[in-house]
């Protein structure tokens, strides 16, 4: 068998992938954050240089261009009609800022096609200088990723247009890598969760398959996944093979013993028939019947353990009806209880003050996947017990979404459910062994057959006697 990765290797790979992904995401995030801070700082520095260019009339930065407005535009700027200047965007949102300080007044108009800038914080600064305020304004331009047209006049000088889009404009803004960092982290988490989920799913799938082994499971298993799982499957297959051989050997020995005892048992019966003492002859015949019965019961129990019968789809109603009819044909007091319709309460709604009701008909066929011969043996054993310990037996079928339960209730039995529950083990018999026939394997066989169908055998006391409940998994 070809082996895959071991869990330890996979875990180391997953840890390495997680660390690399976290490192890449962190680097992208930090780099993007630092680039944005550098961009804002550059825009702020450009504001300081623009102030010096307005004050001195000289270029202070190669990407910062200061040009004088035409006479007509200067008149419009003087009256504050910045949106009517030539080359202004439409729509035009005008932000006006007037700075008065010891260095000389600075009048500013910013025209944008996107927004008016919130300059209240700039004007309310504690003791700002004109250069600091203009630097704060250009930083604001970069913060909002906009390309405004900046118009300014220093003191009594001319109105000038300041073009610094190459520094604080949207095109100059660095690429925001934070979203990519989040995507890298999310993709890494999704990939790791998927890989871990797929790996654990292989264990869950195998566990579920093995849990249903008695319910028609395969003789051996195959599993794809980590090497540890494959090793477990190999070991389990070897164990199942050894278990099958052990049960087969046990059945072969019991079958041989049963066969070999047939001839001497026949001779004993013939010789017993020659005994003239009636009481002694009866006791010897009873001992011979008990001896052969024990062997046959042990053989039946072993065959049930071997899970030899293949499961198939069958109607549980038809099986139970046939069994009950067989008992009734020989005059036994066994009755079949018809199923009852189930009333389901509905919820209240806005349109009805009372709860609605619906009836679920339970008279339809109950289809199960089971072993008909084994189920017939189990039901027959329980009915026989009900007739032994009570005056009559009633049989009913109850179902839900997962299980079907055959309920056999006797009448007149005073046995407690907890006492019967303790007799399920092999060769366990109650206090009535002197006057009730049996070998102590009947309930063990029923419990084994129930386990073969992913079910269970349980007992409950009722108002009339004792209820035996044989539950099996539905199809």
Image (cartoon, grey):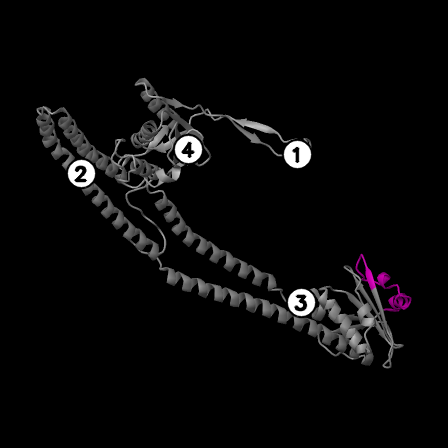
Mark 1 / mark 4, whichever is N-terminal: 1
Question: What crowding class fits label 3: few (fewer than 14 Cα within 10 Å), some (14-19), or many (20 or more)?
Answer: many
Dot 3: what SS?
Answer: loop
Mark 1 / mark 2, whichever is N-terminal: 2
At x 11% / y 34%, what residue is drawn? 260
Question: What crowding class fits label 2: few (fewer than 14 Cα within 10 Å), some (14-19), or many (20 or more)?
Answer: some
Mark 2 / mark 3, whichever is N-terminal: 3
Mark 1 / mark 3, whichever is N-terminal: 3
Q: Which segment is the magenta one?
A: 70-94
Q: CA distance from mark 1 to mark 4?
A: 33 Å
Q: Which residue is mark 4?
A: 404
In the rendered image, residue 383, in percent from the top left (x then y), is placed at: 34, 28
Dot 4: what SS?
Answer: strand
Front tag of 2 and 3: 2
Q: CA distance from mark 4 to mark 2?
A: 33 Å
Quadrant holding the C terminus:
top left
Question: What crowding class fits label 4: few (fewer than 14 Cα within 10 Å), some (14-19), or many (20 or more)?
Answer: many
Question: What crowding class fits label 1: few (fewer than 14 Cα within 10 Å), some (14-19), or many (20 or more)?
Answer: few
Q: Is residue 282 above or below residue 120?
A: above
């Amino acid at each position: 068998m070809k082996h895959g990765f071991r869990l330890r290797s996979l875990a180391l790979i997953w840890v390495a992938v997680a660390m690399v992904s976290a490192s890449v995401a962190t680097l992208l995030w930090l780099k993007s954050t630092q680039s944005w801070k550098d961009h804002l700082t550059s825009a702020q520095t450009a504001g300081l240089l623009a102030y010096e260019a307005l004050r001195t009339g000289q270029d202070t930065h190669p990407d910062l261009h200061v040009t004088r407005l035409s006479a007509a535009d200067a008149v419009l700027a003087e009256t504050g009609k910045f949106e009517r200047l030539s080359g202004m965007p439409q729509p035009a949102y005008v932000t006006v800022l007037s700075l008065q300080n010891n260095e000389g007044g600075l009048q500013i108009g910013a025209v944008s096609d996107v927004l008016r800038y919130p300059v209240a914080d700039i004007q309310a600064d504690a003791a700002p200088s004109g250069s600091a305020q203009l630097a704060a304004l250009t930083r604001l331009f970069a913060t909002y990723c906009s390309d405004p047209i900046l118009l300014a006049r220093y003191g009594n000088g001319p109105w000038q247009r300041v073009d610094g889009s190459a520094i604080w404009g949207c095109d100059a803004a660095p690429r925001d890598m934070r979203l990519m960092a989040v995507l890298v982290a999310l993709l890494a988490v999704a990939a790791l969760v998927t890989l871990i989920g797929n790996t654990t799913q292989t264990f869950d799938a195998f566990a579920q398959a093995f849990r249903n082994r008695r319910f028609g499971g395969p003789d051996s298993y195959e599993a794809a996944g980590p090497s540890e799982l494959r090793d477990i499957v190999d070991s389990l297959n070897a164990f199942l093979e050894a278990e099958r051989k052990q049960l087969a050997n046990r059945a072969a020995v019991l079958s041989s013993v049963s066969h070999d005892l047939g001839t001497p048992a026949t001779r004993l019966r013939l010789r017993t028939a020659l005994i003239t003492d009636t009481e002694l002859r009866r006791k010897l015949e009873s001992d011979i019947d008990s001896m052969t019965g024990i062997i046959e019961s042990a053989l039946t129990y072993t065959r049930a353990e071997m899970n030899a019968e293949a499961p198939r789809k069958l109607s549980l109603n038809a099986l139970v009806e046939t069994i009950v009819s067989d008992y009734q044909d020989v005059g036994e007091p066994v009755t079949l209880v018809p199923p009852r319709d189930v009333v389901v309460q509905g919820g209240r709604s806005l349109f009805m003050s009372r709860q609605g009701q619906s009836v679920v008909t339970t008279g339809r066929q109950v289809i199960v996947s089971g072993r008909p011969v084994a189920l017939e043996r189990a039901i027959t054993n329980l009915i026989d017990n009900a007739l032994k310990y009570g005056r009559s037996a009633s049989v009913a079928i109850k179902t839900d979404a997962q299980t079907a339960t055959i309920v056999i209730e006797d009448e007149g039995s005073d046995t407690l459910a907890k006492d019967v529950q303790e007799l399920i083990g092999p060769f366990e018999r109650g206090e009535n062994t002197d006057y009730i026939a049996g070998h102590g394997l009947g309930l063990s066989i029923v419990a084994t057959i129930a386990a073969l169908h992913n079910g269970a055998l349980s007992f409950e006391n009722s108002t009339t006697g004792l209820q035996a409940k044989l539950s099996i998994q539905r199809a």
